[in-house]
């Protein structure tokens, strides 16, 4: 049921040494503390979702881990810290690939984050519907 790439990543986990796992847990605690400190002076953080141009879906199976790791650089810290985050589509690249910005909030501030996201989404005014779907009947 898993893609070959995901299956390989899952299986590789069985070879992680205990000391490396403990180091990862400590690093996660540092991420959580850094994010907590950031939210002491702001309500939310707004940043690009991806620090690079997005990859085409068809290219993903052929890309190695090093090529795909930058795609989670801005999102994974909030996943690790349990902080809610949402992406708002704001446009497309010259190749037609999506561009968005991410809004992240402190843990348990989901409703505040969603209210801010809804407001900003209305201000941006970008319609994220792919051109191929414009005018298509819903459920057709």
Image (tube, helix red, strand yellow):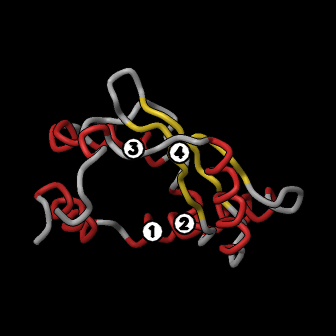
Q: Label 2: state its secondary structure.
A: helix
Along the polypeptide, which appears first: circle 2 or circle 3?
Answer: 3
- Residue under numbered circle 4: 49
Residue occupying image coordinates x 59% and y 72%: 82
- At label 1, counting other C-alpha atoms closer than 10 Å, the crowd grade (few under 14, some 14-19, many 20 or more) is few
Give the alpha-carbon distance from disc 2 to disc 1, as whole Å.
19 Å
Along the polypeptide, which appears first: circle 4 or circle 1?
Answer: 1
Which of these two is toward me, 84 or 98? Answer: 98
Residue occupying image coordinates x 54% and y 70%: 25
Relative to 42, 70 lies left or right: left
- Classify 41 as above or below 80: above
Give coordinates of residue 99: x percent, y percent.
47, 37
- Classify 97 as above or below 18: above
Along the polypeptide, which appears first: circle 3 or circle 4?
Answer: 4
Along the polypeptide, which appears first: circle 4 or circle 2?
Answer: 4
**Which labelled disc corresponds to residue 19?**
1
Q: Label 4: state its secondary structure.
A: loop
Res 52 seen here: yes
Give the alpha-carbon distance from disc 4 to disc 1, as whole Å.
32 Å
- Residue under numbered circle 2: 80
Give the alpha-carbon distance from disc 2 to disc 3, as whole Å.
15 Å
- At label 3, counting other C-alpha atoms closer than 10 Å, the crowd grade (few under 14, some 14-19, many 20 or more) is few
Give the alpha-carbon distance from disc 3 to disc 4, as whole Å.
13 Å
Residue occupying image coordinates x 26% and y 46%: 133
Along the polypeptide, which appears first: circle 3 or circle 1?
Answer: 1
Along the polypeptide, which appears first: circle 2 or circle 1?
Answer: 1
- At label 4, counting other C-alpha atoms closer than 10 Å, the crowd grade (few under 14, some 14-19, many 20 or more) is many
Circle 3 or circle 4, nearest the eye: 4
């Amino acid at each position: 049921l898993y893609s070959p790439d995901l299956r390989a990543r899952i299986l590789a986990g069985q070879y992680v040494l205990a000391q490396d796992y403990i180091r990862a847990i400590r690093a996660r605690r540092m991420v959580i503390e850094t994010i907590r400190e950031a939210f002491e002076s702001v309500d939310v953080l707004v940043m690009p979702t991806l620090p690079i141009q997005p990859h085409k879906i068809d290219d993903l199976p052929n890309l190695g881990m090093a090529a795909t790791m930058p795609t989670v650089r801005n999102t994974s810290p909030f996943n690790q810290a349990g902080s809610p985050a949402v992406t708002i589509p704001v446009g497309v690249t010259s190749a037609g690939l999506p561009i968005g910005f991410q809004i992240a909030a402190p843990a348990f501030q989901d409703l505040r984050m969603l209210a801010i996201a809804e407001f900003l989404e209305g201000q941006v005014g970008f319609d994220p519907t792919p051109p191929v779907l414009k005018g298509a009947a819903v459920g057709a």
